[in-house]
Image: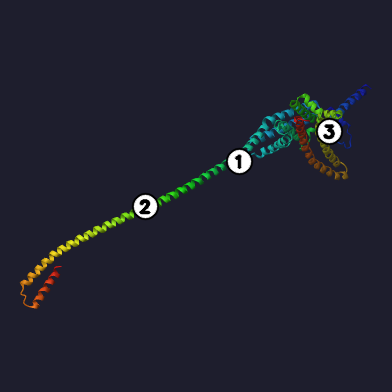
Amino acid sequence: MRTIQLAAEQLAALELAAGEELNPLIPHTSEIIVGFVAFSLLYMVLRRAVVPKFEKAFADRTDAIQGGMERAEKAQREAEAALTQYKSQLSDARGEAQQIREEARVQGAAIIEEMRAKAQEEAARITSSAQAAIEAERQQAINSLRSEVGTLATELASKIVGEALDDQVRQSRIVDRFLADLEKQK
Amino acid sequence: MRVYAATEGVKDEGFNPPDAGDFNLPPFIDGNSFATKPILLAFLSVLIISVFFILAARKSAVVPSKLQFAGESIYGFVRNDLGRDVIGHEFMRFVPYLFTLFTFILVNNVFGIVPLIQFPTMSRVSFPYVLAAITFFVFHYIGVRRHGLISYLKGIMFIPGVPKPAYILITPLELATYFIVRPMTLSLRLFANMFAGHLLLLVFILGGEHLLQGVIGLKVVSPFSFVVAIALTFFEFMVQCLQAYIFTLLTALYITGALADEH
């Protein structure tokens, strides 16, 4: 009797406990503690070791993209500046070249003019000196011819005188011989 | 163990539909209430999440590896869609909390369909209670810090732009909303979804098993039960992700409300 009663009491207690256990809305102390500890642990890990790293990666990426774009813009601005500079330098150089060409042309013309004048002067000088030389030679030739003609005339006269000028044939023969001698002497 | 034996003893020879007792898993070490499957799973989830994200975030490279990209996608989702887009310019302070909340709930939920584990930790009501309690304290703490205790409570109790007599009706409702309904719905929504989902899977899997042991006619029906169980598994995966998302989203919304100038 006593044992049956005890068993019944135990069964009732078990059923009560079971009912409590079966109510899924009743929390368990150990699970609450674990839930809190596990969650806190995870929070610490993610906050310390994960979030900052991902944020750093995001920031670096933004930087890389923005920096790249800024660098590209800067390079473009620099290129444009260089282009303008080159263009202005080129037009300067062109102007300078034009000027130099103009100067060279003027200078060349002046030089040609000068050279021509010099050449003409030289030619005139050469011509006049040649004429002087020719005149001098002619004078000399005339002088020598004059003295030679005198000598020859004298010589011819003496030969004619030395021969007997008796006939016409003889006379002409002497003259012819004289002339032939002259020819031979030349 | 004793309790489990007691509930088991009640079951008869026929088909015993799964009930709340199936969620009371006995400890592996007798009498040690910490040595249970849900507790082990909670710690396992912490380990899995920590290892995964520490490995993914380790290099924090500008050009991410596949692992880093995967980690960043999840983190970026919580950070941008749940943090920045909901809370606004102050969001960065709360991102670690929202991120922890989302990943912790998600992994523990998905345990429900992971082969061999197959138990959603959040179907043990203690865990949703803890998480809802933390959210409850976090958003009230933020509200009090931002506005001061008196004006924070005044903001909750007396919504501006309401005719004075209406406060008789509205003030108790608002108080109940902020101090009872919010934490209760937050925790029970998560718990009930996981509880019901697991129960549903148990019904079709254990039912299919039971049919298989029956007469030939029942054996033929059995595969349909398993097919439904498989379909439900996919459905459960969706619910598990959705519940993690909702819990985190609501927490972000509550924080936003506490930060706002007018409640």
Q: Kindly check if marks 2 and 1 are in contact, taking CB atoms under 8 A apart as contact.
A: no
Which kind of residue does numbered mark 1 sit on? Met
Q: Nearer the viewer, mark 2 or mark 1?
A: 2
What subunit carries mark 2? A
Q: Chain of mark 1?
A: A
Q: Chain of mark 3?
A: B
> x and y percent of residue B248 in the render?
76, 34
Q: Nearer the viewer, residue B168 or B37?
A: B168
Up the image or down, A180 lies above or below A119; here it is below
- Drawn side of residue A4 relative to residue B70, left or right: right
Give the residue pinned by disc 1.
A69
Disc 2 and disc 1: Cα gap in Å? 61 Å
Q: Nearer the viewer, mark 3 or mark 2?
A: 2
Q: How was the colour assigned to the protein in this rendering?
A: rainbow
As drawn, is B257 to the left or to the right of B9? left
Residue B80 seen in the figure: yes
- Quarter-of-image position of residue B217: top right
Using the image, tell me which numbered label, if any, was put on residue A110. Answer: 2
Q: Are marks 3 and 1 on the same chain?
A: no
